[in-house]
Amino acid sequence: MDQIKIGKFIAECRKKQNLTQSQLAEKLGITDRAISKWENGRAMPDSSLMLDLCSILNISVNDLLSGEVIGMENNDKKNEQLLLDMAKEVESKNKIIWNSMWIIMWVSITALLTGLFLTAFLIPEGPWQLVAILVLCVVFLIPCFYALKLEVSIGAYKCKNCGHEIVPTYKQALNAMHRGTTRYLKCPKCNKRTWCKKVISKD
């Protein structure tokens, strides 16, 4: 999706309705700063606001996402292209999240090992060394929990038994035994527990 084009289209439609940014913002229950960001192409309207925005501007959601008024004869082709563009955008964001998760994990592991190494050499054996090791381990767990949240937020876990793709809650994933990003989960389809491999794309 072309955010610049969509932003200009929103501004054009707003002016056609004789609305200022402040008036449009008031109707939507948001700030005029948000409207300004949309129209400058620096942000997109939240999905929860799109229907109300389109209703106020007297356009369709397809028009909004295309950044232009679509004739009925071109509607199907535009819908297909919009779906493809949205799928590519989601896939791109998922890859960024996935890579971020691995970066967080490797940086955390490196920091933990470095910290343990320095603790062993710089702090004499005794209670302070033990306290330092415990603090390092606790600090290491914080990014681990965040990395798991990123892992769960995208894709699904594929059941080894029936192939069904499971989307567990954060708590279910946290409590499941795991080997890397493969987790031991109960499949809601075949009702069996099995090692489920992480896959980025969902069915």
Image (cartoon, grey):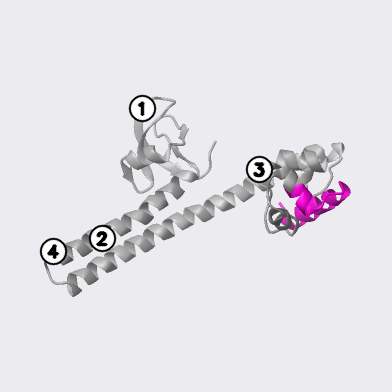
Residue drawn at 37 percent across, 50 percent down: 145
Residue extent of the magenta highlight:
1-25
Q: What residue type is labelled 3?
A: Ser
- Report the side of 13 relative to 161 (left or right): right
Contact between labelled residues 2 and 4, with CB atoms less than 8 Å apart: no
Residue placed under numbered mark 3 in the picture? 47
- In this view, 187 is above or below 173: above
Residue placed under numbered mark 4 in the picture? 127
- In this view, 99 is above or below 181: below
Q: Distance between the residues labelled 1 and 3?
A: 36 Å
Q: Secondary structure beneath disc 2?
A: helix
Q: How far apart are marks 2 and 3 (CA)?
A: 42 Å
Residue drawn at 43 percent across, 43 percent down: 198
Q: Which label sits on residue 135?
A: 2
Residue drawn at 45 percent across, 34 percent down: 166
Q: In which quarter of the image is the C terminus?
A: top right
Is 31 contained in the magenta span?
A: no
Q: What residue type is labelled 2?
A: Val
**Quarter location, residue 112:** bottom left
Q: Secondary structure beneath disc 3?
A: helix
Residue placed under numbered mark 1 in the picture? 192
Q: Earlier in the sequence, mark 1 or mark 3?
A: 3
Measured as percent of width and height from the top left, residue 134 is found at 22, 59
Q: Distance between the residues labelled 4 and 1?
A: 46 Å
Measured as percent of width and height from the top left, residue 193 is found at 34, 30
Residue drawn at 32 percent across, 54 percent down: 141
Q: Which amino acid does label 1 sit on?
A: Lys
**Crowd rating for badge 1 (residues with CA inside 10 Å; few <14, some 14–19, many 20+):** few
**Crowd rating for badge 2 (residues with CA inside 10 Å; few <14, some 14–19, many 20+):** few
Contact between labelled residues 3 and 1, with CB atoms less than 8 Å apart: no
Do we see residue 131 in this rendering? yes
